[in-house]
Amino acid sequence: MSLTSSSEPDPSAGRREELARNLAGVRSRIAAACAAAGRDAGDVTLIAVTKTRPAADVLLLHELGVPDFGENKDQEAAPKAAACAAAGVPVRWHFVGQLQTNKAPSVARYASVVHSVDRVRLARALGKAARAAGQELTCLVQVSLAAADTTTTAADDPARGGVPIGQIGEVAEAIEAEPGLVLGGVMAVAPLGVPPGEAFAPLPSCSLAVRKIRPQAAIISAGMTGDLEAAIGNGATHVRIGTALLGARRPPVR
Ligand SMILES: *Cc1c(COP(=O)(O)O)cnc(C)c1O
């Protein structure tokens, strides 16, 4: 990595170009997947997952027309959200990671959507936090698509967490029962080692289980850099893209 001297051009110009190119690539993948599935490209919302990336990248992508951003750790998301708010940029934040109940008050202050609600206790904590913050919070039920015998995953595996398909209704009811929360739909991460087309096949029935409780809860959040086509083919309405937009992340420190 080279040091930038003051005689060099604005380094953010190069990054902006890179992000614009990546964004065009992701948008065309989404459009192609929608066309293949006979769906309208406007039916799929792109969420830029900016974990490990600076607020400067969020601001550049926002200028390029992306309003939705995802983060998976409150300790990183809270200051990033504060930096964007201080810059006067109205970002819609999606919290997509494993969430501890004691972090609910912080997350409720900046997030519009929490994708990773996988237990009744968390729904109650988020409801209380949303009311205290005076903010309406959309919540998705995170579903585990892993076979029952393959639930051991690393602490930073995005597939970690999620309710078994048979318990979707219970968590959805708990969200629906909380004033301040809006039941929005379902979220899933494809488990490793399963072809994504196969892994995502239960998504429509998972969505139906939630829509039985609230018919408007039609969000299906599924699809990452490696599997967005399979997710869109199985009904995803929101894809969560990090690597293809922002570049490879460093492996997390353990
Ligand atoms: C990191 C992450 C993503 C984005 O993953 P990429 O493969 O980099 O696109 C999506 N969803 C969740 C829950 C994540 O943690």
Image: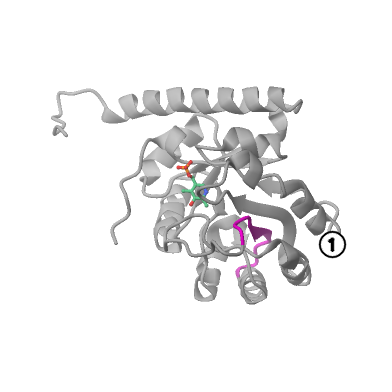
Q: Residue drawn 45% across and 62% down?
A: 74
Label 1 neighbour load within 10 Å: few <14, some 14-19, many 20+: some
* Quadrant including the C terminus: bottom left
Q: Residue drawn 50% across and 67% down?
A: 106
Q: Is residue 119 left or right of residue 80?
A: right
Q: Is residue 241 visible?
A: yes
Q: Is residue 44 visible?
A: no
* Quadrant including the N terminus: top left
Q: Residue drawn 54% across and 64% down?
A: 151
Q: Nearer the viewer, residue 44 or 230?
A: 230
Q: Dot 1 lies on which element?
A: loop
Residue holding disc 1: 213
Q: Where residue 17 sits: x, y (%)? A: 38, 23
The verdict on residue 146 being magenta is yes
Q: Where residue 201 sits: x, y (%)? A: 70, 44
Question: Which region is colored magenta?
Answer: 133-147
User: What colour scheme was applied to this rendering of the protein?
Assistant: one colour
Q: Nearer the viewer, residue 216 or 189?
A: 189
Q: Residue drawn 73% across and 68% down?
A: 167
Asked if 225 appears above or below 221 in the picture, the reply is above
Instruction: Place residue 141 in its image quadrant.
Output: bottom right
Q: Nearer the viewer, residue 69 or 191?
A: 191
Asked if 131 appears above or below 109 in the picture, the reply is below
Instruction: Place residue 112 in its image quadrant.
Output: bottom right
Q: Where residue 196 sits: x, y (%)? A: 59, 41
What's under tag 1, amino acid-wise?
Ile
The verdict on residue 69 being magenta is no
Whether the residue carrying mark 1 lies under 8 Å from ligand 1 is answered with no
Q: Is residue 231 left or right of residue 185?
A: left
